[in-house]
Image: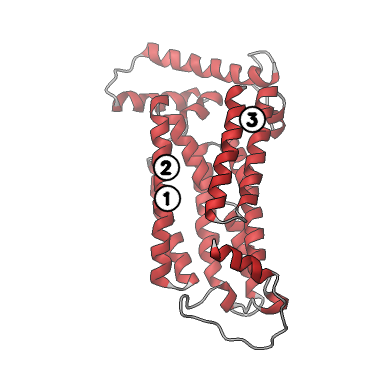
Amino acid sequence: MEAYFNATNASSTPRTACSSWEFDKTVYQDTITTDWDLVCTARDFLPTLAYIIGSIGVMIGTPLGGYAADRFGRKPTYFAFLALQVVFGAATVAAPRAHYGYYVFLTLYTIHSVSVNPIYLVPSTLGLEIITPDCRATFLVLLTLAYTAGAVAFTGIAYALRSWRPMVLATILPFTLYGMFWFVLPESPRWLLLKGRSKEFNVYLRKMAKINRVEWSESLEGKASQLCIDARGVSHSSLSNVNESSHDATYSYLDLFRGPRIRRHTILMLIMSIVVQVLNRFSCSQFFALLFMYQLVCLFFVCRH
């Protein structure tokens, strides 16, 4: 709370021009501010600009990742954004220390930020589409715990390294190990089902049957193929009111506003996202208190309707 008010008061304190400066390196050896002298009236806004541009990248990446996951599949989308995360994230440390290096860093960081949400949301969706409904709540809780554990671990890494470039490499390079999961991670069975890819869907079901020690038969394969055809037709007719035989329908984000129920839920989620960003200006206690109250109101209207 005290830090918040100090920062608020500092923003209204009159400033004077300066031509030389010395950085306090008691806590950190170097940051983007010290590397590119982002201080005084001419350049002190640039660290905030990096945060703003990075947030725009995250905003772009969220719908882009959702569209790619529905268009190309969960598995290829995840690994494409994972590569984006690793390549451009690691490349930021190569930004030169000359003044123009900040803009090189800003460009790389913005592209990297596009991948932030997809590499979390896409595998989360994939997991929810594989497991049974009774396990989904536990799955989401474990995801949240893992996310929190990573955030706590990051503070230890920052304390140990005290320099932003090694810190970036220490947190980005481990993602390269995730590339091994390409050979074991399955595609979403729900996505295969809705896309009418019956052969791949049957292969996936065969693997599930083998793991669960269920005998596979021709009748089960036929039912799976018919299920794939039926699900494809129903998914098209549910949103666009076309005949079930119409297998060439395409959708866009406008479909989120066509029906009254999904339109209401979409608008509430958009408002909630905006409010979360606004509440980031408050202290931690104020943020979580207001966020909790606001989510209760949103959930009340969603559940009621």
Q: Mark 2 against mark 3, which lies toward the viewer?
A: 3
Q: Mark 2 points at which residue?
A: 143
> Which of these two is toward me, 180 or 109?
109
Which badge, 1 or 2, comes first in the chain's sequence?
A: 2
> Which of these two is toward me, 214 or 56?
56
Q: How crowded is mark 2: few (under 14 residues within 10 Å), some or many (20 or more)?
A: some
Q: How crowded is mark 1: few (under 14 residues within 10 Å), some or many (20 or more)?
A: few
Residue 265 shows which numbered tag?
3
Which badge, 2 or 3, comes first in the chain's sequence?
A: 2
What x and y, as percent, mark residue 159?
41, 69
Q: Distance between the residues labelled 3 and 1?
A: 27 Å
What x and y, as percent, mark residue 212?
29, 25
Whether 19 is drawn above or below 122: the answer is below
Secondary structure category for the residue under label 1: helix
Q: Mark 2 is on which residue type?
A: Leu
The image quarter containing residue 64 is: top right
The reply to whether the C-beta atoms of the residues labelled 3 and 1 are less than 8 Å apart is no
Residue 185 visible in rendering: no
Residue 87 shows which numbered tag?
none
Whether 73 is drawn above or below 244: the answer is below
Residue 225 visible in rendering: yes
Whether 227 is drawn above or below 67: the answer is above
Secondary structure category for the residue under label 2: helix
Query: On the rendered image, what quadrant is the C terminus found in?
Result: top right
Q: Which residue is drawn at 39% across and 25% down?
A: 134
Residue 148 shows which numbered tag?
1
Q: What colour scheme was applied to this rendering of the protein? A: secondary structure
Horizontal arrangement in the rendering, residue 254 relative to residue 23 (left or right): right
Q: How far apart are marks 2 and 3 (CA)?
A: 24 Å
What x and y, as percent, mark residue 240?
70, 20
